[in-house]
Image (cartoon, grey):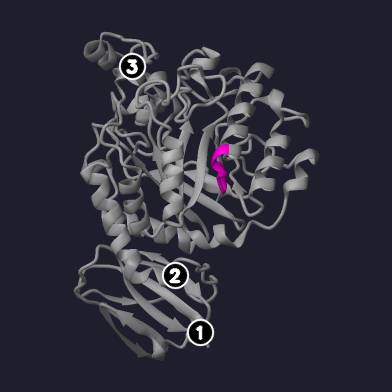
């Protein structure tokens, strides 16, 4: 599958969709992801670390992704399985759909927080691997949030709130896995083709869902996950080819990610530390949660999560290398953002409010003009004829920037919450006291 593949090849029938990725996506830089589902009721996963840093068998057995609870509790001897037996008596997973009430959910309140971060787009899960739809998806019977649990069209509420704030709206859809539809065994190691539904029945089911999302909600971003059923890939009436046709007809400036199998994509993706080879010269996006999970996880605390400063640094690192960041929050079962995640997003928003003009719409600074560093921490962006250095170090630290004095007018540098001095073609920044969590900023004109 194209997801995390070094050099995916676009089949002939999908080449009709190949074009320059729209500028809005390359300029957007920041999106907010939301994972929300019945898994938000148990909200349980072992916070063992970041994807891409842990052996696969250990990863699945001790999965930190709370949204994978349905899978993890079915693995023999897993701590999640023991927790499920002790806490819920081994209840059927769909018990959580009925317990999920979303009683405190206010889409406008969530979107106010999203808007305050400076994010340009927003992507909620419409159906995750558990197969529960957050709208009245065709063919799902009562196994959706309109008929059970919250008894609300959550996708519609999110879409309307995003549109009221001028935030581009996308949808996540798990085409590659549906544990309810396929009744597949638990995944205990690498997700190979034997563990995902590939047949015509599931392909038609997924087609009807995505076609309905396109028609009802007119998303500007299609965010697939894991894969797409193989029976739906050849061209035909109920095919992925037809879905992309409908999508681009409805949204000519729309974009799709690379997790629909080796078919079509407008941008590549990485996730935490996995898929970093996809972060190349073309458009790409890194996604991660504030913590180690995407779904709300009761076991996570500050030690497992990005602080405000950490979120700003991660965002700047991604943008400085040419990517976008899709930063996830996991709503509680009642529909609220946890205090921990709210603090992180508010700090990121405060920093972006002060310095976003040097980030949003920026491009990476050419490596020959200046170079990043990790100790002390320095990253670079460029807008127009100005280079921007971001320096994160304690107040009083003196940092010599590794910049080309023949290409940058170092003597004309200006700094926010720092002072600068130039001697011998070297620009030195002295970090001052600063109220905002995150780096100080230095602006340097290009010659």
Say which quarter of the image contains residue 60.
Answer: top left
- The mark nearer the N terminus, 3 or 2, is 3
* Alpha-carbon span between mark 1 and mark 3: 57 Å
Q: Residue at x 51, y 45 (%)?
A: 170
Question: In the rendering, at what x and y percent does residue 344 appear?
Answer: 27, 52
Disc 2: CA contacts within 10 A as few (<14), some (14-19) or many (>=20): many
Judge left or right: residue 126 versus residue 235: left
- The mark nearer the N terminus, 1 or 2, is 2
Question: In the rendering, at what x and y percent does residue 446 appear?
Answer: 51, 84
- Which residues are the magenta region? 216-222
Residue 217 covered by magenta stretch: yes
Disc 1: CA contacts within 10 A as few (<14), some (14-19) or many (>=20): some
Residue 111 covered by magenta stretch: no
Say which quarter of the image contains residue 52.
Answer: top left
* Alpha-carbon span between mark 3 and mark 2: 44 Å
Q: Residue at x 55, y 45 (%)?
A: 219
Q: Name the residue under label 2.
A: 380
Q: Mark 3 points at which residue?
A: 78
Q: Mark 1 points at which residue?
A: 446
Judge left or right: residue 116 versus residue 232: left
Q: Residue at x 29, y 49 (%)?
A: 306
């Amino acid at each position: 599958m194209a997801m995390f593949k070094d050099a995916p090849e676009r089949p002939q029938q999908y080449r009709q969709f190949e074009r320059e990725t729209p500028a809005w996506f390359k300029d957007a830089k920041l999106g907010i992801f939301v994972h929300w589902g019945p898994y938000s009721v148990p909200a349980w996963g072992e916070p063992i670390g970041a994807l891409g840093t842990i052996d696969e068998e250990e990863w699945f057995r001790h999965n930190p992704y709370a949204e994978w609870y349905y899978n993890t509790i079915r693995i023999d001897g897993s701590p999640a399985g023991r927790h499920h037996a002790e806490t819920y008596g081994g209840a059927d997973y769909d018990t959580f759909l009925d317990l999920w009430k979303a009683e405190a959910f206010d889409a406008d309140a969530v979107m106010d927080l999203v808007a305050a971060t400076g994010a340009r787009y927003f992507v909620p899960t419409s159906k995750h691997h558990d197969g529960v739809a957050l709208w009245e998806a065709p063919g799902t019977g009562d196994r959706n949030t309109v008929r059970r649990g919250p008894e609300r069209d959550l996708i519609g509420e999110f879409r309307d709130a995003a549109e009221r704030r001028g935030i581009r709206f996308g949808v996540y859809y798990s085409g590659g896995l549906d544990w309810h539809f396929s009744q597949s065994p638990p995944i205990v190691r690498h997700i190979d083709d034997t563990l995902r539904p590939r047949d015509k029945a599931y392909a038609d089911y997924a087609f009807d869902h995505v076609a309905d999302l396109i028609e009802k909600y007119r998303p500007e971003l299609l965010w697939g996950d894991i894969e797409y059923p193989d029976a739906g890939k050849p061209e035909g009436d109920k095919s992925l080819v037809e879905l992309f046709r409908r999508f681009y007809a409805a949204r000519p400036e729309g974009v799709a990610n690379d997790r629909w199998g080796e078919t079509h994509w407008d941008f590549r993706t990485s996730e935490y530390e996995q898929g970093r080879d996809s972060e190349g010269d073309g458009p790409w996006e890194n996604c991660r949660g504030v913590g180690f999970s995407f779904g709300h996880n009761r076991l996570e605390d500050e030690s497992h999560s990005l602080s405000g400063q950490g979120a700003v640094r991660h965002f700047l690192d991604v943008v400085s290398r040419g990517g976008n960041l899709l930063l996830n929050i996991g709503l509680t079962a009642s529909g609220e953002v946890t205090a921990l995640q709210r603090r992180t997003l508010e700090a990121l928003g405060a920093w972006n409010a002060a310095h976003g003009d040097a980030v949003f719409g920026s491009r990476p600074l050419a490596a020959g003009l200046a170079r990043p560093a990790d100790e002390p921490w320095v990253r670079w962006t460029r807008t127009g004829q100005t280079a921007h250095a971001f320096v994160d170090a304690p107040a009083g630290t003196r940092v010599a920037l590794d910049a080309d004095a023949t290409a940058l007018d170092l003597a004309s540098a200006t700094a926010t919450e720092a002072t600068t001095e130039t001697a011998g073609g070297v620009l030195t920044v002295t970090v001052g006291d600063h109220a905002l969590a995150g780096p100080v900023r230095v602006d340097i004109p290009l010659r």
